[in-house]
Image: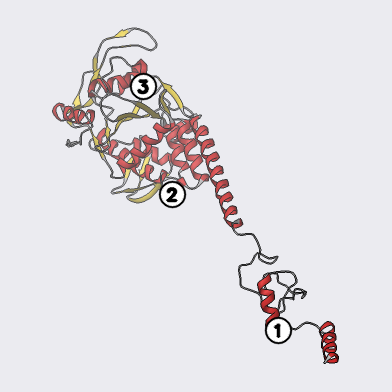
């Protein structure tokens, strides 16, 4: 018996250990103790390919944290968080930089505090938007090419009051040939006092600039003008070209030698030069100035939609030139912030897109002969007063142009 025992003990010491699956006692002991020796038995190599990756069997699919398990749990989530944080910070920096860059381009040159005898403020916000015939920035060759003429100074080519309120936005066109009262004013150059007189509306701008024009609009409408914005020929052309042109569909051919307009019927893309000719032409229209305002509203609608389209807003190679072209020649009042400009633009886009009302002040006489001003248009006294009251009180506009 003693010999057998010695022989078994000798064999146990010299032969390699059995795999765990062939030695249930050792497998159980190993599983129960984790690492280290159990009863003097050294730890056995894994044949199941555990998380350490040193076994001979197939890899373990467990979620162990040994040397072969890759990144620690949560490391991927942290990478995603830091990446998103970096993108947000970068976007914030670009947005803030763009805001200050654009804000620095705004020309705040109109001082509405100089306007005399202003009406009390109503409800909502009123913008006076003016398209002038300023040739600023144009060479002699460009003046000839654009059919603008070479007249000195500036006159108003178009005027609109944009009312933004809780009961719908309204864009009201004011014919430049409107026969209105220009209130008493002091000349900018002569410093003389001139009495109130009846003239065409665009005479106010020629005599006293944006401040007198604002006062004249306020005097004849009773509306308090909160902000003023003006763009000239050069800014208009550059803005349209920066957009890559504006798409227009014409019901009939359009030709006007004075403005240079010459377009066939049908849909087409107008560049800056062609767009300026389109909005300035009036000799083909039976009602001339009123017909021109309809074309201006139609063009403005297409321009606003293209400027606010994803293809423009999400493409910096288009967006930045558009912003630069628009702001370089945009003249506004001293209290108008970039936020106000943006709000004005989006309101215009909404109105011209059908989310609001676009109209002309009601007219009673379209071709009124005057003593010194040629042919003018006269507002319908009853309907226009009702319209101005609805705008002042921010009521839903029920008055129509006709």
Q: Nearer the viewer, residue 230 or 98?
A: 98
Residues at discs 3 and 1 in contact (Cβ within 8 Å):
no
- Report the number of numbered marks: 3
Q: Is residue 367 visible?
A: no
Say which residue label 1 marks. 23
Q: Residue at x 23, y 24 (%)?
A: 221
- Quarter of the image for residue 271 reads top left
> Of circles 2 and 1, which is in front?
1
Q: CA distance from mark 3 to mark 2?
A: 34 Å
Q: Is residue 394 visible?
A: yes
Residues at discs 3 and 2 in contact (Cβ within 8 Å):
no
Q: Quadrant of the N terminus?
A: bottom right
- Quarter of the image for residue 224 reads top left
- In the picture, measured across the screen, residue 130 lies left or right of residue 28, that is left
Q: Is residue 80 above or below residue 366?
A: below
**Residue 81 got which mark?**
none
Q: Earlier in the sequence, mark 3 or mark 1?
A: 1
Say which residue label 3 marks. 210
Q: Earlier in the sequence, mark 2 or mark 1?
A: 1
- In the picture, measured across the screen, residue 64 lies left or right of residue 304, that is right
- In the picture, measured across the screen, residue 250 lies left or right of residue 142, that is left
Q: Position of residue 144 (x, y in %)?
A: 45, 32
Q: Residue at x 72, y 69 (%)?
A: 35
Say which residue label 2 marks. 310
Q: Position of residue 398 (x, y in %)?
A: 17, 37
Q: Position of residue 278 (x, y in %)?
A: 35, 40
Q: Nearer the viewer, residue 333 or 370?
A: 333
> Of circles 3 and 2, which is in front?
2
User: What secondary structure is found at the residue carrying circle 1?
Assistant: loop
Is the residue marked by circle 2 packed among few (<14), some (14-19), or many (20+) residues within 10 Å?
Answer: few
> Residue lying farthest front?
1
């Amino acid at each position: 018996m003693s010999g057998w025992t010695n022989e078994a003990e000798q064999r146990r010491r010299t032969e390699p250990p059995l795999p765990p699956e062939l030695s249930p006692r050792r497998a159980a002991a190993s599983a129960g103790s984790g690492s280290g020796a159990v009863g003097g038995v050294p730890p056995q190599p894994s044949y199941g390919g555990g998380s350490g990756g040193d076994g001979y069997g197939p890899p373990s699919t467990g979620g162990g944290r040994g040397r072969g398990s890759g990144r620690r749990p949560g490391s991927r989530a942290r990478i995603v968080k830091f990446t998103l944080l970096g993108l947000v910070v970068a976007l914030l920096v670009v947005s803030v930089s763009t805001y200050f860059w654009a804000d620095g381009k705004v020309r705040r040159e109109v001082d509405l505090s100089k306007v005399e005898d202003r009406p009390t403020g109503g409800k909502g916000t009123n913008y006076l938007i003016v398209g002038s015939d300023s040739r600023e920035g144009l060479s002699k060759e460009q003046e000839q090419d654009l059919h603008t003429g070479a007249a000195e100074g500036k006159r108003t080519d178009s005027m609109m009051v944009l009312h933004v309120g809780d009961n719908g936005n309204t864009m009201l066109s004011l014919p430049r040939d409107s026969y209105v009262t220009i209130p008493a004013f002091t000349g900018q150059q002569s410093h003389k006092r001139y009495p109130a007189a009846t003239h065409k509306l665009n005479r106010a701008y020629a005599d006293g600039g944006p401040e007198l024009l604002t006062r004249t609009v306020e005097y004849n409408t009773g509306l308090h003008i909160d902000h003023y914005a003006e763009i000239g020929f050069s800014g208009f052309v550059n803005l349209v070209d920066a957009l890559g042109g504006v798409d227009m569909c014409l019901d009939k051919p359009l030709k006007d030698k004075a403005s240079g307009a010459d377009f066939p019927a049908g849909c087409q893309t107008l560049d800056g030069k062609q767009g300026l000719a389109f909005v300035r032409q009036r000799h083909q229209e039976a009602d001339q100035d009123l017909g021109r305002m309809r074309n201006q509203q139609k063009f403005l609608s297409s321009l606003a939609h293209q400027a606010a389209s994803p293809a423009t807003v999400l493409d910096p190679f288009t967006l930045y030139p558009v912003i630069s072209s628009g702001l370089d020649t945009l003249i506004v009042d001293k209290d108008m912030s970039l936020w106000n400009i943006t709000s004005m633009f989006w309101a215009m886009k909404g109105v011209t897109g059908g989310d609001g009302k676009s109209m002309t002040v009601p007219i009673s006489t379209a071709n009124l002969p005057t003593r010194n001003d040629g042919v003018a248009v006269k507002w319908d006294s009853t309907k226009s007063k009702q319209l101005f009251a609805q705008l002042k009180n921010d009521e839903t506009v029920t008055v129509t142009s006709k």
